[in-house]
Image (cartoon, grey):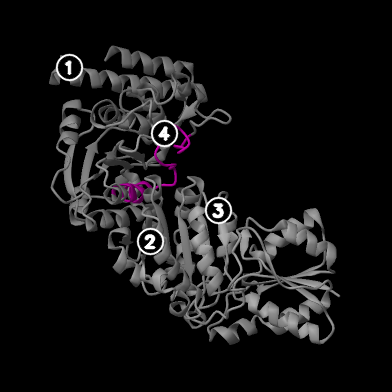
Amino acid sequence: MTETREELIQRLEGKASGIRRNIWRALKASGTGHAGGSLSAADILAALYFYKMNVRPTEPDWADRDRFVLSKGHANAGLGATLALAGFVPDSYVESFYAMDSLFGMHPDIKCPGVEMSTGGLGHGLAVGVGMALGARIKGRSFHTYVMIGDGELHEGSNWEAAMAGAHYRLANLTAIIDSNKISQSARVAEVMGIEPLADKWRAFGWEVHEANGHNMTEVIDALDRIPYSRNKPNAFIAHTIKGKGASFAEDTYLWHQNAVNEEIFAKAIAELETV
Amino acid sequence: MAAGVATNDWRTKSASQTRLAFGQALLELGAIDPDVVVLSADTQDLLGIREYIELYPDRFLEIGIAEQNKIGIAAGLATVGLKPYVCGYAPFVTARSLEQVRNDVAYANQKVVIGAAASGISLGVSGGTHHAVEDLATMRSFANMTVIVPADVDETYKATLASIDIDGPVYIRLGGRTLDPAITDPNGAFTLGKATELRSGNDVTIVACGVMVAMAVQAADALKAEGINARVLNMSTIKPLDTDALLKAAAETRGIVTAEEHHVTGGLGGAVAEFLVEHHPIKMRIIGLGDTFAAVGPTGPLRTKYGMSAENIAAKAKELL
C-alpha cells in the first residue's frame, strides 16, 4: 500500500513533533541547551531523515548513504533528537545530552553513529560537504550531500569560499539548506550584520536557489523533491523558519538561542506540542 | 606506472629541494593507491605537482587561494574513504586554516596529509608574512596529529611514501626555494617515530630536524677536530617523539642542544624539553628563532643572523661541557 501525499505529510508532521519532543527531553536532561536553532530545524530534519535521505539507521556507515552535515553544530539537540527517533542510536541517547563521556554533547561528534562530521566552529560544514560531494564523484557513488547552515553562520567568510568551489565544480549532488530563522545569539541577524539579499548572493555565487517556508511540510517536501534544481549547479534551499518554533514562549527571540530548561518549561513545551 | 617511478628519476627532479621531493613522491603514491587525491591552493609549482596533475587529472583538485576551504574539502574527501594530500604554503596552511586543521582534520581524526612547503624562514626575502615559525608548535599540539620534518630530499620522498600507511592526520614540513643539502643515508629506511644517529659521540648530543640536521653534522665535525665527540640525532618525527633515543642521549651524554628553523617556543626544542624535564632532566640549549619576527633577507645569512648555524650549534654544545 503506497502512502498518499496527505498521509506522507501527516506522517512527517508527526516525526517533526517527535523530534521537538526529543529536543525538549534532551534539554530537560541537561538542564539547558540550544532550543531556538534546534526547533527551527525540526521540520526539515524530519523530511530529510524520514523521507528524502537514503540512509540505513542500522548500518550507519553504509557507503552509498546520503550525507547530512549540521554546519550549525549548536543545533545538535535537534540532530541527536532525530538520530534517536530514526534509530541510529537508542532512545536513551536523548537523555545523555551533556552527560560525562556522552557522544551527545552540545555539538555533533563524528564518533556518534549517524553523525558525518564533528562541527561546532561555524563556517566549516559547507567546505566539508563540498569535499563529500567531490568524493562521491571521484568514487563513482551516487549519494547526495546536504549541509544545513544557519543564516547568522553565513557571516563566516569560509562559507563563501565553499560556495565558490561548489559552483566551480558544478556539484549538483550538493545541497545547502539555509535554516533562515533570522536570529543569531545576541540579536536579529539583520542587526548584527546584514546578509540580504541572500538569495541573490547564492545565485551570484553560481547556485540554483529555491525558497520555501521551512515549517510547512508540503513546501519542505516540494523543495527537497525538486533537487537537483538544475543540471549542473549546486542547490541552495533557503528555508524561512522561526527560531524556537513550536513553543510559543520561545519563538522568534534571541532569548531562546540557548537557555535553561526546568520541569515547568518542559511541561509547558510538551503541552503545546500535544495540542497541535 | 607513473613516469617518475618507471625511470626512478625523482631524485634528479627534486633538485635538492624537499618541497619538490614531496611532489615526486605523490607520483608514486598516485600510481599505487587509487584513493590518493591531491589538492592545491594555487600551489602547483611550489610543490612540483604538474606531472601528477597530468597523470591523474581526475584525482587532482585545484581549490584556489582559499586555505580554509582546501582543508575542509580535504576532510570531506577523507570521510568518503579517499586519501587527500594537501599542498600548501606552511605559513598559510597552518595559520590561515588553523581552525579547519584542528576541527575538521585533527578533532574529527581524518586521514589528511598536509605537505607544507616554504616553512621556517626559507622564504627569507618574503618577510614575516611568509615565514612559518610557529607551525610545529601548533601542529604538534593537536591530538591525533603526526608531525614529520624531513631533513633532505631522500628523507622527504621516503616519509611521504610512508605517510600513506599512517592512520590519521599527518603534517609534513618542507623547505622553500633554497637548496636542502643531502644528509641522510640514501640506502637507509625512514621509520616513523625513530631518530637516526648521524654521528656517534658521548660528550654532548645535538638533536636537529629539517635543514638544521646538515648544520648539526657540520657542527659535530668541527667539534670533533677540537676533541669533542658530539652525537647527532636526526629527529625527523617530532610527533610521536623518539623518547628512547632521548633517554639514551640524556643518560650517555652531558647535555643536549636542539636545533630547528622555528621559533624557540613550542617546536622540536620544546618537545624534547617537555619530555626530558619529566623523565631525565639534563642541561639543554634550544636553537631557533628567538622571540622576534625575522627580518627580511637572503635565507642563508638570515639563518646565521638568528643563530641557526653550525657555528652557533657548536658554540652552544661547548657551553654544556
Report the side of B111 relative to A215 (left or right): right
Chain of residue at mark 4: A
Q: Label 2, on which residue?
A: B31
Q: Label 3, on which residue?
A: B145
Are callouts 1 and 4 both on one chain?
yes
Quarter of the rendering occupied by the C terminus of chain B? bottom right
Judge the density around disc 4: few (<14), some (14-19), many (≥20) Cα neighbours within 10 Å. many
Which is more N-terminal, label 3 or label 2? Answer: 2
Q: Label 1, on which residue?
A: A7
Give the magenta-colored segment's residue range: A106-133
- Dominant secondary structure (helix, strand or loop) of the stretch shown in magenta: loop
Q: Which circle, 2 or 1, is nearer the viewer?
A: 2
User: Does residue B59 show up magenta in the picture?
Assistant: no
Report the side of B132 relative to B317 (left or right): left
Q: Which mark is residue A76?
A: 4
Residue B52: x and y in percent read 35, 67
Q: Is residue A71 above or below residue A10?
A: below
Q: Secondary structure at mark 4?
A: helix
User: Does residue A127 show up magenta in the picture?
Assistant: yes
Residue B268: x and y in percent read 66, 65
- Cα–Cα span, label 1 and label 4: 28 Å
Amino acid type for the residue under numbered disc 1: Glu
